[in-house]
Amino acid sequence: ELLNWARRQGFANARARVYDSARTLAYAPVTEWLRAEPFQPAVRQLPVAWLGEVTRLLPELLDERSDLPRPEPLTERWQLQRFYEALARTVMAAGQPLLLLLDDIQWCDPETLEWLGYLLHFDRTGRMLVVATLRPEEVEERHPLASFLLNLRAEDLLTEIPLDRLTAAETTALAALVADNPLAPAAAERLFAETEGNPLFIVETVRSLASKLPGDEVGGAAAGLTPPAPLPARLQVVIQRRLAQLTPDAREVAELAAVAGRAFTYDLLARSSSFGEDALVAALDELWGRRLVRVRNADDYDFSHGRIREVANAQVSPTRRRLLHRRIAVALEQLHPDDLDAVAGELAAHSEQAGLRQQAAGYYARAAESAHRLLAYPEMAAFLQKRLDLLDSLPATPENLARQLDTLSRLGGALLIVKGLTAPEVEETLRRARTLCELVDDADKRFEVLLALRFYWGQRCQWDEAAQLNAELLALGYRSEEPVHLQAALRLTGAHSFHQGRFQEAHHYFEQATSLFEVNQPRSHGQDFEQDQGIANLRRLAPTLWLLGFPDQARPRIQELLERTRAISRPFDMLMSLDFAFDLAHYLRDPHLTQAYAAEYSALVAKHPYPHCVAVDLTFRGWVLAEQGAADEGIVLIQRGIDQLRALDTLLYSSQGLALLVEAYLRAGRHTQGIVVVDEALAFVGQIGESYWNAEFHRAKGDMLLASGA
């Protein structure tokens, strides 16, 4: 860009580039400059006395000019004065202003650097700018360029412009320039994440894509760019070359750090290596000086780019990598003896890579439990899956089968939240757990698995499977010494009755479950969605009381439900309780309270977008729009939520969304269409076997018929 700008201004300019392989060629960049078009007239017009010196770099002039004497060899330092002046006169005669560009000056030969110093002092009135690009990580303290730059700084002849990492917007702009096409927002975001704003990585990543496509496809592909998973070949070579320049100690520390991970600490390296303090500090200083690692704080480091770590790690042999992982695992245990849970995930990964499968499985369990305490369900599920994979590779001893069952049970519960209440992964995991229940004699674990399966099939309105599971759960509950088991079994059996419109029967089961609850009763150690029995009982009892005609008894139950749920501070529990609270406030014809619950639900879903809850939130927001006078927009939103729930195969409480949709049609005054919607709703809930809201559907249809004059 700078050269193009200079050309447009009519300025003389020339460009030279130094290559690592050519760093021993004296005056190579000067020769390239002198052969550039702007210098040709100056060379031709130079007096013979000076031109003879220039032929040292441009010997072809001797063929063109027979009158030129062949220069004598430079055997003494004093002879350089005339040679340097001849070159300087040639350059300054090219026309001014003059721009000289030198790429990769870090590989420049000492002779050229010495002459550049001479040139910059040759004519202080001349209008000349020398621009050089530099990779500071390549310049050691004893590098000739270091003293050259130091002298220029001292004389105020140097302006340095560090090229920092680019912002996301700058990354997008540079990539679009290289690709000759704008990037789609999602592609730009991925590119920035992949390159971390490193200009070289941006350019090479985009070029790598271009090199794999025909010319007419490059622009379009770049617009939807997905950064390639493999490192572009040129980047790999650049990084390998930087690593190859390290001393043996620094390279060994780089490899150890790469195996440790993107971020690492001094103490970890000290514990897991054989280096003494002085040697380790020297190696880290070298890595820092070459900008391969950066300091985060007094003790923490990380690689300056993830790709550097990737290449360093790839250079470690499999056998040595296994050894390093083992050393790092031991070091982590030594560094965190009183808080292994904090590093359980790292310990698990390093133990696994070290071949310590049983140890790794144990640490994955601890890591999953730590994630669970933080309500980090995706991480919890990932750790449990890794533990399960390891256990599958171990002998099928009774102990390992029991561990597999425990892992599958917990994984099924986590997947219900992460993937969705009816995700195929949930059924697959729980089905396998149920099979293991036949091999492992653990009544509590069997109950947990059956409970999760009952929840899964209930959400899909598969009532035959649900009824069979109800019977098994009740039988186990009556035999169990855990009071929470019988409560859960009674409540789920009552839920079956509720959804099929048998409210008295449902109330009987819910009251039985509630009577078994004690305030200080321990929570279930099983699934998160039914952990606090008091809360779960209230969710079911309150709407049943309203449907039986006892709204005054239902209202305080829902207030108690929310108070108890807020006290345990669990987002998924809070969303479930707000769902029931919204329903009851809606039943009670309290629009202000209903809207308040909807707003709280939406705010929580924004922070915790569980698939089922995202769909339910659409129906709530649509109802609020209809209530506020935007019924047509509300209808669209409610229908989207219903469609999403059906796509998830989450059919339980379909009556809820359909009821909100019918009410929105009433609000819109679209009675004829609304009657069709009611008929479709009745047909659908009849098909899935859910009839608890049928009476209200018929009432709504009557209101619409009356309003339409039918």
Image (spheres, rainbow, N blue to C red):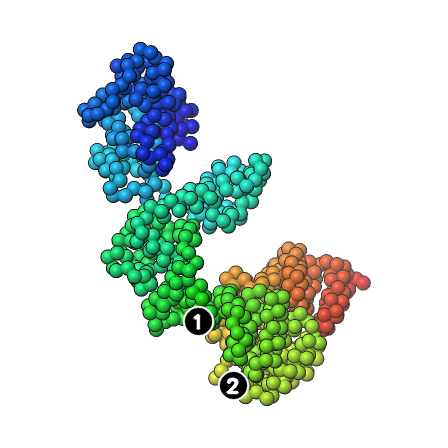
Residues tagged 2 and 1 counted as in contact (Cβ below 8 A):
no
Q: Is residue 21 left or right of residue 73?
A: right
User: How many numbered circles are shown?
Assistant: 2
Circle 2 or circle 1, nearest the eye: 1
Along the line of sight, which residue is nearer the eye, 558 or 44?
A: 44
Q: Is residue 63 visible?
A: yes
Horizontal and vertical percent position of residue 192: 46, 47
Q: Is residue 470 left or right of residue 108?
A: right
State which tag comes first along the sequence, 2 or 1. Answer: 1
Quadrant assignment for the C terminus: bottom right
The residue beneath circle 1 is: 359
Residue 129 placement: quadrant = top left
User: Mark 1 belongs to which amino acid?
Assistant: Gln
Horizontal and vertical percent position of residue 178: 48, 37
Quadrant assignment for the N terminus: top left
Cα distance between the residues tagged 2 and 1: 39 Å
Q: Taking 659 as reference, is 555 above or below it?
A: below
User: Mark 2 belongs to which amino acid?
Assistant: Glu
Q: Residue at x 50, y 69 (%)?
A: 390
Horizontal and vertical percent position of residue 646: 67, 63
Q: Is residue 452 visible?
A: no
Residue 325 placement: quadrant = bottom left
Q: Residue at x 40, y 50 (%)?
A: 308
Along the line of sight, which residue is nearer the eye, 334 or 62?
A: 62
Horizontal and vertical percent position of residue 589: 63, 70
* SS assignment at label 1: helix
Q: Residues within 10 Å of mark 1 (few under 14, many from 20)?
A: some
Q: Residue at x 39, y 56 (%)?
A: 258
Q: Taking 380 as reference, is 672 above or below it?
A: above
The residue beneath circle 2 is: 518
